[in-house]
Amino acid sequence: MLRVFREVLAPACLSSDSPRFFAFIPAAATKAALVFDTVVGASSICATSWLEASGAVYAENEALRYVADLAGMGPDAGGCFVSGGSAGNLSALVAARETATTRRGDRPARWRVAVGEESHSSITSALKVIDCDPLVIPSGPAGRMNGDSLRAVLSADADPSSICAIAATAGTTNAGIIDDLAGLAAVARDRDIWLHVDGAYGGAALAAPSVRDRFTGIELCDSLVVDPHKWLYAPFDSCALLYRQPELARAAHSQHASYLDPMRMEGEWNPADYAYHLSRRARGLPFWYSLAVYGTDAYSEAIEQVLATTRAAAARVDEVDHVSLIRDPELSVVLFRRPGWDDAAYYAWSRRLLDEQIAFILPTRWEGEVVARAVFLNPNTTLEIFDEVLDTMR
Ligand SMILES: Cc1ncc(COP(=O)(O)O)c(C=O)c1O
């Protein structure tokens, strides 16, 4: 059967850890994390509760602490690992809505969530699931949701008390832009609104000193998601979901049943209490193991290396004549255009590069225009590989 996988199934799948994978958000799990994922899979651990898996949950909590400390969320922050940013965003917004209902004492006709124009599609999807409406805040030319625009929209709004959360993005998927987290946090504080930060992709760059100041204000968030299966070099599927006050998430998510309640002991940490799930794989362990094997400095170095390659790639786009840079990258996404190409030319180029196994790179839209988008994440992606891609656009 392994032969069937090797010869039939695997060739019909793309390897998202290829250094030539520039599409969506790539992945690049470390060897240690991959090996330990196999151990987790073979261990039959159900990491729902402290009772069932205190060893695994203890280690997962150490990995969560690393992320919480990077963000400066304070000593009480905690949460659990869920399957991905989508599940993390949904769980955090449920906690925000339930907290708002408790504080307000009733429910408005419709709860709403303030979102940026560039927020991830999973936020829209989560709002559909929880039956909330988005209040879209215009981004302006910088492409980021900022405190002044949010304040202006809320001041003009007929029912601002129906806003149960602000969903900010720390690293938009399309362009790697970080919202004005300090400005948004100030509005959240003044109006007593929950601030959620979606750092599923970009949050990893908290570990990179060269860009850390762009995240100022993140320390004031009420909830945060960062996906180790993206830029923290863990295998799928793994999202670190954190709350400043975990007891608020517990109040929203704890499930009760006569056969479940005996698992609950005062002071014990049950991952099931912090998201909409119950049974769960100890999916934070491969990340924990990898952090322990390589050390946190190795993570900072890898992320800095990716940022340096991204900057060099953007400079190269600027340098050569046949392509032009759309904006300086804030994190690790380079948007660029090929003057003279229509939409069909971008899609045909992308298809050809995949067919010829040169690279997997997909076009996107920026301000209505179809453009090329390259996402860097794998430390083994070199400028030489990117040069090869640029050469195919001549
Ligand atoms: C900013 C952001 N949020 C959320 C998600 C969704 O994460 P997942 O695919 O792990 O559910 C992504 C995925 O790319 C993302 O970039």
Image: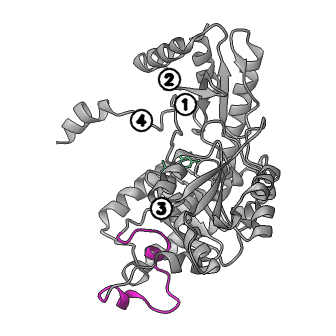
Q: Is residue 321 above or below residue 79?
A: above
Q: Earlier in the sequence, mark 1 or mark 4?
A: 4
Marks 3 & 2, CB-CB < 8 Å contact: no
Left/right placement of residue 354 relative to residue 64 reads left
Q: Is residue 216 visible?
A: no
SS type, badge 1: loop
Pointer 3 or 2: first along the chain: 3
Q: Secondary structure at mark 3?
A: loop
Pinpoint residue 393: horizontal percent, then vertical percent: 59, 11
- Quarter of the rendering containing residue 139: top right
Work out whether 266 lies above or below 140: below
**What number is the disc on residue 130?**
3
Residue type marked 2: Ala
Query: Looking at numbered disc 4 in the image, what kind of residue is underneath it?
Result: Ser
Q: Residues within 10 Å of mark 1 (few under 14, many from 20)?
A: many
Q: Which of the two discs, 3 and 1, labels the residue nearer the N terminus?
A: 1
The picture places residue 148, in percent across and down from the top left corner, at 83, 52
Q: Is residue 256 above or below residue 117?
A: below
- Front label number (1 vs 4): 1
Q: Which numbered mark, 3 or 4, is in the foreground of this view? A: 3
Q: Which residue is mark 2?
A: 359
* Mark 3 or 1, closer to the camera: 3
Discs 1, 2 touching: Cβ within 8 Å? yes
Q: Residue at x 49, y 64 (%)?
A: 81
> Is there CB contact under 8 Å for labels 4 and 2?
no
Q: Position of residue 287 (x, y in %)?
A: 51, 59
Q: Residues within 10 Å of mark 4 (few under 14, many from 20)?
A: some
The image's mark for residue 15 is 4
- Secondary structure found at label 4: loop
| Residue linked to disc 1 | 22
**Image: magenta residue range:** 258-279
